[in-house]
Structure formats: C-alpha cells, structure tokens
Amino acid sequence: MDNNEIKKFCMELIYADYENDIIDILKKYNFWDNTKCWRTFGDRENNFSIINNQSRNSDAALVEKLINSIDARLINECLIKKIDPESQTAPKTVREAVGKFFGDNPNSNNSGVISNWTNIKRTEISRGITLAATGAKPYGGDPSYTIVDIGEGKTPDDMPTTFLSIAESNKLRTPFVHGKYNQGGTGVLKFCGKYNFQLILTKRNPNLLPKNALKDDHKWGFTIIRREPPAEGRVHSMFTYLAPLNVEEKPKEGDVLRFKADELPLFPEGNKPYERNTKWGTLIKLYEYLSEGFRSNILMKSGLLSHMDLLLTSPALPIRLHECREYGGKKGSYDTTLAGIQVRLVDDKNENLEVGFPTSFTMNINGEPLKATIYAFCKDKDKTYRRSEGVLFTINGQTHDIWTTDFFRRKSIGLSLIYSSILVIVDCSELSYRTREDLFPSSRDRMSNNEFKKNIEEELELELKNNQLIRDLKERRHRELIQSKLENDKPLEETLKFIFKKHPILSKLFLDGERISNPLKTIGVKEIETEYVGKKHPTYFKFKGKEYGFDLHRDANLGLRCRISFETDVVNDYFDREMDKGYNELFYELNGTTCIYPYNNRMNLENGIATLNIKLPEEAKVGDRYKYICKVYDRTLVEPFKNGFSITVKEPIKISKGNGNRKNPPSNEKGDERENQPRIAFPPIQRVNEIDWNKYTPPFDKYTALRIIFMEHDENSNKDIYEFYINMDNIYLLNELKTRINEQEIIKTRFEVAMVIIGLSLIQFYDKDKHAESADDKTSENKNGNSVEDKIEETTKALAPIILPLIDSVGSIDLETEQTIEFTGEN
C-alpha cells in the first residue's frame, strides 16, 4: 500500500459508524482474517483480565478518555514552553498547570479554575478538545463517539508504548496530570459494541520533534483495536491491534500503519463531524458505544452532557460537545461547551439555587483536608442538573464516587423533607497520595470501604445535620408545604386513643411523649430571608452570648460530642476561601499535658455563628476534665482570638432495649411517687389531595396511600419524629366512596386510621435496629433506594386495594356526634 492508499484506508475507518462497516473495510484491505497483521495489546496475551476489570460504567469510562485529552493538552503546553514535565520547575498540580499555561494571570491560583473564565474564553479553549456523536439516531441505538484533541500527539513508533500499552510508567512522574496508572484509556473497550473496536490516529506536534527526528516521526500513525475470541488453547478473549508493517522481520510485533499528510479534517464544526483541519493531535473513535440511559441527543437534559457534567464537575479544561446526528427530521442542536456542573451552577445561581448557597466547609480527617461545597436547589430545579446523585467525590474535577440523595435521608442527618434539593461536592484533590490510593481504586469510579471512608461519612452527617442554612431551608419548605393544610387532628387522635385503649398491644407502636400540636416554629425562620453581610476579617470572635475572655464550661456524655458555639462578624467563607483565609487551631490539656486536638477541628461558620463539634479523646473516662484553647487567626490579625473552655466527661447515656426510650414500669406502691403512664402521642398527620400532589418530591399519584417523612431525631428523648401524609384521593379510597354515598366520613376515617396504624407498625418492623446500624450497612441500604420511607410507601400502595374491604368484612366504625367510637363487630 502506498501513502495515498493508507491514508484512504484510515479515512474510511474514521467515516464509518457501525461495526459491520468496519469489518467490511478490514476485509476489503485483507486485514480481517490475517492474524499475522494483529499485535497483542500491551504485548500481553492475558490482557483481557486487566482491560475487562476497569470502569463498571460506560459513562465513567468515557470520561477517562476526555481526561487523557486534557492531560495531553497540558503536557503539550508544558513542552512548548520548554519545561520538562517531570522536573522541579514543572507545575505541581493540575490547577497550577492550567493557570500557568491557559490562564490570563499565570501567577494567580484563580486563573487555573475555569469557573473564573468568561464564556468566550471557555468556548475558545474548548475547541482544542471535542467529542462528536455520529451513527445511530438518538433513541435508535448506541452512537459512535469521536474524541479529538490538539495535545502533544505521539509518533507512530511511540504508539505501542503509550496508547497501546498497559501499566507502563508514562505519566507516573508528571505531577500535574490526572492519569497515573496507564489503565484508564482501556476502560472504554468493553463498552464498544460486540467486537470492541476502537480507532486511534495520532501525530506528534512538529514543534516538539528534535532536529534529528526520524522521517516517520513526522507522519500520522493509526491502528484499530479489536477483541478476539479464545483460540489456540486460550480460555479468555484477547485484545489485539492492527500492526501489519514489518511482520516478517518482527513476528507478533509488527508496526502500526502510517502516512504523510500536512493536515487532516478531524475536528467537528457545528453538526459536521470531520470539518476543521489540524496539523497534529489525536483522534479516538469508539464504535457503537454502549449508551444505556443517555441515547438521546447528547446536548439534551437526558443526554450525555448531563452525565458528563456530573462526572466532570469542574474539568481542568473545557470540552466542546457536538451532536452530529439527525433526529426528529431535523439536524441536531449542534454544539455546546462542557464545563461541569459547578460552572453551570455558578452561572445559573440566581435562577436555580436557594439564597445563601452554595456554601463551603473544610473537613480535616486524620490531618487530611477535604473541601465540601453544598448546593441547595430551588424547588424542582434539581431535575435540570441530576437524577439521584447526592454526594460527588472528586479529584481535580473528576468524580471518583457518587452517593445517591438517599444519603440525606439517613436518620443521623434528617433531611428527608428536602433530600431531593441537596447536592454536595467533596473535593479530595489535596489528600496525600497514600490516602488517595487507599480510598479510590485505579478504576476511579468507586470508593473503598475503609476507616477513612467511615470518618468521611460521620463528618458529613454531622455537618449536614447542624448546618444552619440547611436547617433554615428545611423549616421553610416544611412551612410552605403544610401552612395551608393545618387541621385539627383531635377527632382522629380520639379515634386512635379509643382503639389503643381497647387493644393495648397497639399502643406499643406509638412513641412515648406528648402530642405535637403545632409542627411549625413560631420563632426562628423568617418568611423572607435577609442576606447576611459579613466583614472580610473578624473584629471579634467569642462564645455566643458571652463577653470575650469568658471561661466556658460544658458537660459531655461519654460517646457523644459536645457542641461549642461562637459569634463573630466575619464572612461565611472565611475558613474556606483561597486568599487571606482564616485558620483555627484547637488544643486540649489533661493532667498538665497539652496536646493537639487529633480529630476534625473544622469550624462551621454560617451568618455570624461558628460552631465546633468536639469529639472526646479515645482515652476519655468518666470524671475527666479537659481544658481546651481555640485559636482563630489569619495573616492580617495582630493577635489571634483565643477562647478557652473546659469539658467534664459524664456517664454515657444508657439506651434500653426495645424502642430505646421506655420508661420504668409503675411500682406497686401507692402515693405521688408512682410514675404516670405516658400519654399516647402520634405524628402530625397531613391529608393530601390531588391538587397538591405535585408539591411533593417525588409527586404523589393515584396509587400512593401513605408517605412518611423522617423529620429529626430528638436527642433529649431519644425519639424519632416522623410526619405522615395520607393521600385522600387514592384511587381505591375514591372507588369505595363512590359506592357508599351515605358513609363518606366513616370510610375516610377507616382509611386514615388504617394507614396510621400500618405506618407505625412498619416503622417498628423495618427500623427497630436503626441505632445499631453500621455506616456500611446504611450506605448499602441507601444506595439501593431501600430507605424505610420508600419501603413503607411501596407496602401501603400494595395494601391500599384491600384495606377497606378487609376492615368492612371484620367490623365497622361508627362516629357518634361527640366523636367517640363504638365497634360493632360481626361474630
């Protein structure tokens, strides 16, 4: 084959979009059945076990390809500036590299964050890395994706040790890139159709070639990867790539095809996939790529863009996406810039986020810093950005693990009411290499279950539970939800009391304590939020409600944390901002020995109120008294603010078996000392009609019978507080009401009573071990979407068709004029 024939062969592979077409092209050039022309990927016959053990999700694997393109661009710019990427003068982090090579001010950290760039600049830079969708029409099948970058590129002879290698140390000593394991690029292969075809075309940047470069170093090199079935005694498949040159001289180690061309039309323009010329760079094409869940137009809300936004929350460099397929009889909406959800949320902040958000805080776990950012969506706005993703763990803007929004429904957090409105992004970029390697496998799509992960969970739970902005939002949403629905539940309460009095075993389903008569706070959250305006640096920092210098004392039960509150006049991001940030240090003294506080000393700062949650030392015992000194400072303060307090360790709170809050049984002695029986109390009950179905998340439907929402755990009484929402327009209830015109109130009351009793019983059944759950158990349960609330809603849906006929067959409820109850059962 001469140069033109080889180039023609390459372009045919580029323009093809289906595996059958690729096979036909390879057969036409006599390569398909010629095994001598195919070289083992990585020169390892057992490469299948390595390649097949990469990313579990096709979208996460696709991200790895984009990450490789970002790395290639950063290395290219580094080399152009004649900086050795492995030298001491090279940038130390990804953000530093972006700021140095692409930022407007190379000496500013902020210039390395694309959220600080203008839209024009993002678009301009994004044209250097593109992804184009071709092939199967949206919704019609799996598309083919072509990724092109104007990075450093490789020479044809370098391809076997770079693109086509496994576990080589290509970027191991380059500190400012993402890829370290030399594996991520192969993760896409198992998602590429039936034969796992992947095309690679590359050319080295001519400006990076030495003067004595070989003639072939100036050429384009290309190959196509395929998966071969077991053969010749092999029990597994094997990945090979086309390398037909010099196979006679080097059996099984042939060279890839190459050709000379000054430039090629590889980059897309609008909806044309191969239009803009480039003189160097790399093209990767993935044929019939598995796109389950995002086969629509890639730029639509349900398309690839929304997935990439979550998996690349803040990419080091922006990427241009092009939809080049026809759909609905029209051409696609062409192109847009992928800049990550964090950039989108900053750009759309006023329209989609609640006032005061996003808000950030820093966790310090075992000396390792993690910065977390909380986003709270306006009602129903979250659907624009995500499905059920709740907590994203990122490194250099790439998501490494995702926890669903069910994490916020844990009882240790208590955000069931607003769980669908919360998104948390935890930046793990500053973790030490050892911690990062232990926490995230090389596949970078999940988190290892270890002690560090458990500590992250614990700190996140604590922050989300106590964050004042979130607490205010929860209260405000609660108010909006039931303000117009407050009703006098006395008749229903009396009905339930009578039933429980007649059948004492049922009373055990209720939590002891007094009835909650008003679920709304009368003081606290304002109807109209006013934005807090703080100072850049604090002029005071003291205990809340006390004068500066006050010696505070607190008691703490063994095994529980102690919360210390401060008040100040500084801005909310004082401890988290990049420039002139504040620091707090915490020391404790016991028996004359001063120690550095070993746990997370992060201070939560919201609207002038700062809080510390003190965990007692592991060696603490009842009676110990610890003295603490908290120092707050920044480089502008002449003297740090020092606040001293002490904590005395008290007996641990004892929780009895059973419901955890059972009082002592009454004694046989007469007199005033005998303990009174607890009153029957039941959760606030709201009746929901069809007109209000869409106010809830997810919305009610005609089959919904009962929804319970966990509100909070009362530490003082050790009780879980729920609210019950009964669908009064349930289809089975309405059917009964249509056939029994003269018994409307009786039928409604039966339905309500049944739902309340069933709900309480199911809470006891599903949640009886709630305080003993381990973090791993909770994570597994929540990730599967099997929260107590979900289980009860599904169970009551199943029971709704039979509950009224069942009650009717065994007895009836008659309401007398004074709202008392009589049972007239059939024998």
Image (cartoon, grey):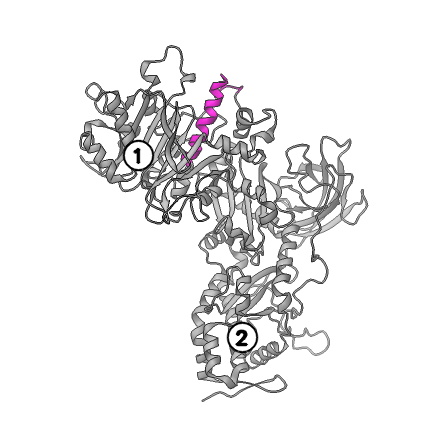
Graded by Cα atoms within 10 Å as few (under 14), some (14 to 19) or many (20 or more), the crowding at tag 2 reads many
Amino acid type, residue under disc 2 in the picture:
Glu
Can residue 390 be seen here? The reply is yes
Q: Is residue 41 above or below residue 629?
A: above
Q: Which residue in the protein does label 2 denote?
A: 752
Graded by Cα atoms within 10 Å as few (under 14), some (14 to 19) or many (20 or more), the crowding at tag 1 reads some
Q: Secondary structure at mark 2?
A: helix
Amino acid type, residue under disc 1 in the picture:
Tyr
Earlier residue among tags 2 and 1: 1
> At x 36% / y 44%, what residue is drawn?
326
The quadrant in which residue 251 appears is top left
Q: Position of residue 741 (x, y in %)?
A: 50, 84
Q: Main secondary structure of the magenta part?
A: helix
Q: Is residue 411 above or below residue 644?
A: below
* Region rendered in magenta: 64-89
Q: Position of residue 61 (x, y in %)?
A: 39, 39
Q: Is residue 721 above or below residue 296?
A: below
The quadrant in which residue 490 appears is bottom right
Q: How many marks?
A: 2
Q: Is residue 56 left or right of residue 771?
A: left
Q: Point out the frontmost of discs 2 and 1.
A: 1
Label ID, residue 5: none
Can residue 162 be seen here? The reply is no
Q: Is residue 632 left or right of residue 761?
A: right
Q: Position of residue 695 (x, y in %)?
A: 55, 62
Please check the rendered image and state whether residue 81 is part of the magenta-colored stretch, yes or no.
yes
Quadrant holding the N terminus: top left
Q: Is residue 783 left or right of residue 712?
A: left
Q: Position of residue 330 (x, y in %)?
A: 38, 46
Label ID, residue 15: 1
